[in-house]
Image (cartoon, rainbow, N blue to C red):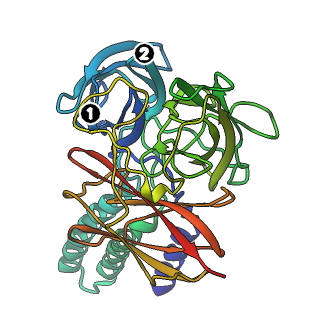
């Protein structure tokens, strides 16, 4: 009996496949941050419990977030349904089948096509063994008792009872090991190859602008083209991480301009976001993304903004106080953000050492709310742009955000702490000097 149970346990563990970190699971909402029509918002595609049935789409945004026109298309049969969603006014779209779909969102002359899959949980394939084993064991136990009552020797009753006990033990073992057993794929899941190595190559990318040399004060499009270096084909299998398909950080070379935005997917392998730079000069672009079955990576690029130079009082981003009220809608291409002075920032130790953790504390104005899955974000760039770091708040309660960051080398660093409240996103710029 003991040998049989050990053999069953070894087989179950050996046959269990490792869980992929980014497997899409049925019953989970899909949250995707988008920078559209001058606003920063999060689109939430709620989990579907049955098909055919309703698909709920919500918009989480700030007071300036616009209404979105929605168009849902089934990739399988081309069926299309339409609707409108806004903060506090979700849309109910009907889906007829599981599998690949495309959700087109539009507002202010911009649009994005978001590919996703409608998934419905089929239940665990191990439930049949669990309940079936218990059912059969119950019948055998009853049969064993009856056999024992009418059989003087009781040998047959012993055999029947032993088999029933084995069924109970196997069912109990599966119940214990079920969290580690391979999950059954939900209806609508993408087929995964079984005869190829896990992992895909990193994305190759190019960052450009439209027009190629934008002018200061005028709207332009920052474009990220993604392709596979081996095949040259567009890469269109990005996985959502930190509630976005990609995080784009655009900064001026002097550190006075900063934007953390989430581009729109306008075509396979193409991401775009509208921006406006208020002064000429060289601008650096850093793109954080992650390909399915691959690791996270950082793409870099640069472009130049033309135009007459504007008089400036200081090139220190910690003294930049330009702001816009996030409570008022804006028609510009810039997400509604509010910059704060660097006074509420405390760095410990006051003179950080390269390669050693430092603590950055930021006093907040208002109660922070989750944004991109976190209470706060800290983005740090080396003065000349050769390094960009991005860490998250440590979960400190109260009105202060707390970050831990290790500056990799001596030098001057531009830094921006960001958090969201009900009024919008606040950005706190400051600089840090790391001595040699």
Within-10-Å neighbours for mark 2: few <14, some 14–19, many 20+: few
Query: Sequence order check: which comes first, mark 2 or mark 1?
Result: 1
Q: Name the quadrant of the N terminus.
A: bottom left
Rendered residue at 35%/79% (across/down):
162
Q: Is residue 416 visible?
A: no
> What is the x, y in percent for residue 255?
55, 52
Q: Which mark is residue 109?
A: 2
Q: Name the quadrant containing residue 16.
A: bottom right
Rendered residue at 61%/30% (across/down):
308
> What is the x, y in percent for residue 247?
51, 46
Q: Is residue 69 left or right of residue 320?
A: left
- Disc 1 element: strand
> What is the x, y in percent for residue 270?
61, 29
Q: Name the quadrant containing residue 155.
A: bottom left
Q: Name the quadrant containing residue 395.
A: bottom left
* Dot in front, 2 or 1: 2
Q: Is residue 423 left or right of residue 221?
A: left
Q: Is residue 378 left or right of residue 167?
A: right
Nearer the observer, 31 or 400: 400
What is the tally of numbered marks visible in this picture? 2
Taking 101 as reference, is 355 above or below it?
Answer: below
Nearer the observer, 351 or 331: 351
Taking 87 as reference, is 386 above or below it?
Answer: below
Taking 398 as reference, is 30 above or below it?
Answer: above
Nearer the observer, 331 or 189: 331
Q: Are marks 2 and 1 in contact (CB under 8 Å)?
A: no
- Disc 2 element: loop
Q: CA distance from mark 2 to mark 1?
A: 20 Å
> What is the x, y in percent for residue 168?
32, 73
Within-10-Å neighbours for mark 1: few <14, some 14–19, many 20+: many
Q: Is residue 325 visible?
A: yes
Residue identified by numbered label 1: 58
């Amino acid at each position: 009996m003991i040998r049989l149970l050990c053999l069953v346990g070894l087989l179950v563990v050996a046959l269990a496949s490792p869980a992929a970190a980014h497997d899409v699971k049925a019953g989970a909402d899909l949250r995707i941050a988008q920078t559209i029509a001058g606003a920063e918002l999060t689109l939430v595609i709620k989990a579907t419990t049955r098909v055919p049935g309703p698909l709920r789409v919500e918009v989480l945004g700030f007071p300036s977030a616009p209404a979105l026109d929605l168009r849902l298309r089934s990739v399988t049969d081309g069926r299309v349904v339409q609707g409108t969603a806004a903060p506090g006014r979700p849309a109910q779209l009907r889906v007829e089948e599981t599998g690949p779909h495309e959700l087109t969102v539009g507002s202010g002359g911009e649009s994005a096509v978001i590919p996703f899959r409608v998934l419905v949980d089929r239940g665990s394939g191990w439930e049949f063994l669990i309940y079936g084993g218990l059912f059969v064991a119950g019948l055998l136990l009853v049969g064993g008792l009856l056999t024992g009552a009418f059989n003087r020797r009781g040998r047959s009753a012993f055999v029947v009872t032993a088999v029933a006990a084995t069924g109970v033990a196997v069912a109990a073992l599966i119940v214990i090991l079920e969290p580690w057993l391979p999950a059954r794929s939900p209806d609508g899941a993408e087929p995964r190859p079984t005869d190829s190595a896990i992992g895909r190559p990193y994305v190759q990318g190019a960052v450009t602008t439209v027009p190629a040399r934008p002018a200061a004060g005028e709207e332009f499009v920052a474009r990220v083209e993604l392709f596979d270096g081996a095949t040259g084909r567009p890469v269109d299998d990005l996985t959502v991480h930190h509630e976005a398909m990609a995080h784009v950080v655009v900064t001026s070379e002097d550190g006075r301009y900063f934007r953390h935005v989430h581009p729109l997917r306008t075509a396979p392998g193409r991401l775009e976001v509208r921006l406006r730079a208020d002064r000429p000069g060289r601008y650096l672009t850093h793109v954080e993304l992650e390909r399915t079955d691959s690791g996270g990576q950082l793409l870099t690029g640069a472009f130049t903004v033309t135009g007459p130079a504007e008089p400036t009082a200081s090139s220190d981003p910690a003294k930049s106080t330009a702001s816009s009220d996030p409570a008022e809608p804006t028609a510009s291409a810039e997400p509604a953000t509010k910059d704060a002075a660097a006074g509420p920032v405390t760095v410990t130790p006051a003179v950080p050492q390269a390669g050693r953790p430092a603590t950055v504390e930021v006093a907040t104005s208002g109660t922070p709310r989750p944004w991109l899955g976190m209470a706060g974000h800290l983005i740090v760039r080396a003065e000349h742009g050769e390094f960009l770091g991005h860490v998250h708040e440590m979960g400190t309660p109260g009105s202060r955000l707390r970050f831990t960051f290790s500056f990799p080398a001596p030098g001057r660093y531009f830094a921006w702490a960001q958090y969201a409240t009900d009024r919008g996103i606040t950005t706190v710029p400051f600089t840090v000097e790391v001595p040699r």
